[in-house]
Amino acid sequence: MNWYWIGVAIVVPTALGFLTAWPLWRHGLGTFGSAAGASVIFICGAIFIGREYTELERMSEACIEATGYDCLFSPSAFTRFAVYAGIALFEVFFLFDRGISADRRAYRKQFPSEWS
């Protein structure tokens, strides 16, 4: 596992998800904006899992060519994929939390401040 790619998986999908959701939140489409942002984040998560799978296949092929045997890598493929899936899931939780906050602010703007 490469920490650089884990960092990229934390920063880039979160930014893209918020860039997708924010304009929709501003127009009062909170749920739709959150769903659109979540879709972007999950697609990015699948892309990162695919990148990790490709990397594992390359390392496995190089190991077979060098030794003639298939090598076992640590951490396992499942663990590597679960890291990226977990990152994406956490990012979606965070996005929906921020979306609820945006909805709450938009709702409160509908009423005079002395009603709060």
Image (spheres, rainbow, N blue to C red):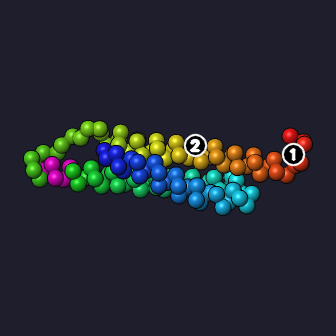
Residue 27 at x, y = what percent? 73, 61
Q: Who's the residue at 17% across and 45% down the image?
A: 70
Quarter occupied by the C terminus: top right
Q: Who's the residue at 10% across and 50% down the image?
A: 66
Residue 102 at x, y = what percent? 70, 49
Instruction: Give the Cα separation between the discs numbered 1 and 2.
Output: 30 Å
Quick check: marks 1 and 2 in contact, CB under 8 Å?
A: no
Q: Is residue 69 magenta?
A: no
Callout 1 environment at 10 Å: few (<14), some (14 to 19), or many (20+)?
A: few
- 51 sits to left or right of 65: right
The kind of residue on which mark 1 rests is Ser
Residue 67 visible? The answer is: yes
Q: Who's the residue at 46% across and 44% down the image?
A: 87
Find the magenta span and give its range: 60-64
Q: Which mark is residue 113?
A: 1
Main secondary structure found in the magenta portion: helix
Q: Quadrant of residue 1?
A: top left
Residue 11 at x, y = what percent? 47, 51
Disc 1 on helix, strand or loop?
Answer: helix
Q: Quadrant of residue 18?
A: bottom right
Residue placed under numbered mark 2 in the picture:
93
- 26 sits to left or right of 16: right
Residue 77 at x, y = what percent? 31, 43
1 or 2: mark nearer the eye: 1
The kind of residue on which mark 2 rests is Phe
